[in-house]
Amino acid sequence: MTRQYIIIGIVVILVIIFLAISLRIVPQASAFVIERLGKFKTVWGAGLHMRIPILDTIAKRVSLKEQVLDFPPQPVITKDNVTVNLDSVVFCKVFDPKLYTYGVENPIAGLQNLSATTLRNIVGELELDQLLTSRDAINQKLQSILDIATDPWGIKVTRVELKNIQPPREIEEVMTKQMRAERERRQTVLEAQAHQEAVVSRAKGDKEAKVLAAQAERDAQIALAEGRAKSIELVYTAEAEGITRLKNANIDSNVLRWNGIKAMKDVADGRATKIFMPTDLASIVSSLGVVAESLGIGDAEKIDRSAKARTPEADDCCEEDDADYTRSSVTHEAVEAARKIETEVTSSLGERYRAAREDQF
């Protein structure tokens, strides 16, 4: 009985060892290339697989993840004979583990050399300025060529990027000077444009200011003219209303004549350089006398109908003095008589004017 248990135990151990040797677990995003007796048998994907010990062997473990291959910089000569160092990065992944295993001895090294030669061919057709400004075109063209070339190797090139372009030091200095000159040119152009805009804006501002000033002056002149016209209209309206009221007051011709005499008095006050005498001065003076006689005022005396006294003959010795005395006495009497007549006529006319105004209102 004990012997049977030992045999069963040995069989179990052998089975466990067999399973441990035969069972294989393939991780995710990986593939195993299996050979049987040195010949390709199959490709295991992710999961649990069993192989026959001694007969089946794992030839290669392949990662199906996308790989990033950063190749070292390499010198490349451009079309205009400028040597630049290019540093490229290639993104690729394995789409066929069998081709990847049996297609080429070292796929990564083959991809690196293929990338270098292809990049030299592409850059050799371009000048330095085109190289610096055509990165996208170079990347697409290089990616297309490498993808087609690596299909027999089971590699899919998804993307290629030029990471760095390093020109010679002399070219860098020239490019730096060129960049500085271009920046200075742009600065000068911008300053000129800014000055032009400032001048134009200032001119527009001056123009608008002058236009506004002209409009303001015009409005002021219009307002002054309107004010003057309104004042003149009010003055003439007031004068017309005064004339209408005087007309309605039934003022007779004596008042008008009296106003004419007052006006003559103001003109002849000694300050004017010219004296205007009315043409009807004689009629005004005679009418004043008639008015004074009719109203019974003034120095009206009865007519002296007695015989005129004989004027004695003038003495030669006192002729000049007597003549001066006579003229002075006559002038004084005339002035006193005129003042008395003026006072009485003024008082009489004033009373009549007030009476007429009271009758009207």
Image (cartoon, rainbow, N blue to C red):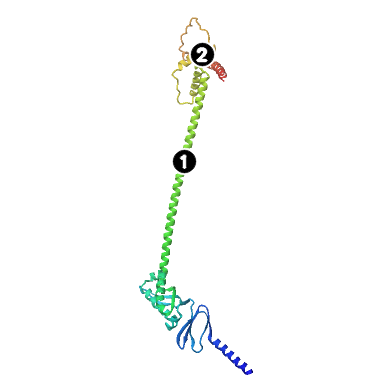
Q: Residue furthest bottom?
A: 3
Q: Which mark is residue 291?
A: 2
Q: Position of residue 168 (x, y in %)?
A: 41, 74
Which element is circle 2 on?
helix
Q: Which mark is residue 303?
A: none
Residue shown at 44% from the left, 49% from the top: 204
Instruction: Determine if residue 34 is in view.
Output: yes
Instruction: Determine if residue 150 is in view.
Output: no
Instruction: Measure the alpha-carbon separation of dots 1 and 2.
Output: 59 Å
Q: Residue furthest right?
A: 1
Quadrant in which the N terminus appears: bottom right
Near mark 2 (Cα within 10 A), the count class, few <14, some 14-19 or many ≥20, is some
Nearest to viewer (mark 1 / mark 2): 1
Quadrant in which the C terminus appears: top right
Residue position marked by numbered label 1 in the rendering:
217
Q: From this view, report whether residue 251 is shown above or below residue 169.
A: above
Q: From this view, report whether residue 300 is shown above or below residue 115.
A: above
Q: Residue furthest front?
A: 1
Task: Describe residue 19's horizontal placement relative to residue 79 as left or right.
Answer: right
- In-front residue for pair 89/50: 50
- In-front residue for pair 37/316: 37
Which element is circle 1 on?
helix
Q: From this view, report whether residue 313 is shown above or below residue 113.
A: above
Q: Position of residue 182 (x, y in %)?
A: 41, 64
Check disc 1 and give the amino acid type: Glu
Q: Position of residue 9 (x, y in %)?
A: 60, 91
Check disc 2 and give the amino acid type: Val
- In-front residue for pair 23/351: 23
Residue shown at 55% from the left, 86% from the top: 19
Counting residues from the start of the chain, the first of labels 1 and 2 encountered is: 1
